Image (tube, rainbow, N blue to C red):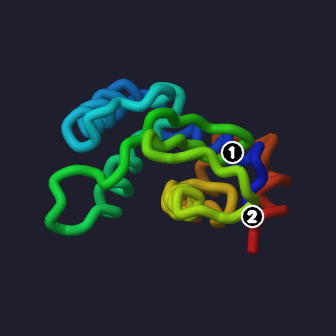
Amino acid sequence: MVSEKLLTSSLELLGVDKKNDYLRLAEEFFRSKAILVPSGLASLPTPWLRALPDILWNMRKPNWEALPFMIRKLGCMDGVFCLAFAQELPNFSDRLTGWDRLRIQINLALQPNLWTPLSLEMERLVWKKRPELREELFKTTP
């Protein structure tokens, strides 16, 4: 597992200079494939903005021309990608729903994340640009 501090730092190091480009592309994707541009899109870290359209698009059935769900809100809390679906009904039980399974699947697909070790390339970038986190890197190495 990657610590939240290490994940946050990793996300900050990747593609900051291209965030506006990826935000524009993500907005276009949501407008054309999901009809609704979710609130909170601009708050996402650049690597997640870049990857999210492809991850979502690959979740649809091959012959579908649009996403099978509408996302109304996105965000990041404590290193976890959070999303709310427009079609989702309130869950008053403690049962895991299909929407929850979808959230888990998306969280695991976004890289870096809390549950997957950092890539060697990412570890090297953190080592070089954030020397104060070197000890943290050793804690998460498998």
Please state which of the two labelled residues, at mark 2 or mark 1, is closer to the viewer.
1
Which kind of residue does numbered mark 2 sit on?
Answer: Met
User: Looking at the picture, does residue 49 appear above or below residue 59?
Assistant: above
Residue at the extreme bottom: 142
Quarter that holds the C terminus: bottom right
Residue 14 is left or right of residue 77, and the answer is left
Residue 29 is left or right of residue 97, and the answer is left
Residue 81 appears at what percent x and percent y?
59, 46
Q: CA distance from mark 2 to mark 1?
A: 12 Å
**Residue 25 visible here:** no
Residue 83 appears at what percent x and percent y?
54, 42
Nearest the viewer among 103 and 99 is 99
Nearest the viewer among 25 and 7 is 25
At horizontal 30% and vertical 28% (from top left) the residue drawn is: 24
Nearest the viewer among 68 and 28 is 68
Mark 2, secondary structure of its residue: loop
Q: In the image, which disc is placed on residue 1?
A: 2
Residue 63 appears at what percent x and percent y?
14, 66
* Residue linked to disc 1: 79
Residue 127 appears at what percent x and percent y?
69, 50
Mark 1, secondary structure of its residue: loop
At horizontal 78% and vertical 53% (from top left) the residue drawn is: 3
**Residue 65 visible here:** yes
Which kind of residue does numbered mark 1 sit on?
Answer: Gly
**How packed is label 1: few (under 14 Cα within 10 Å), some, or many (20 or more)?**
some
Quarter that holds the N terminus: bottom right
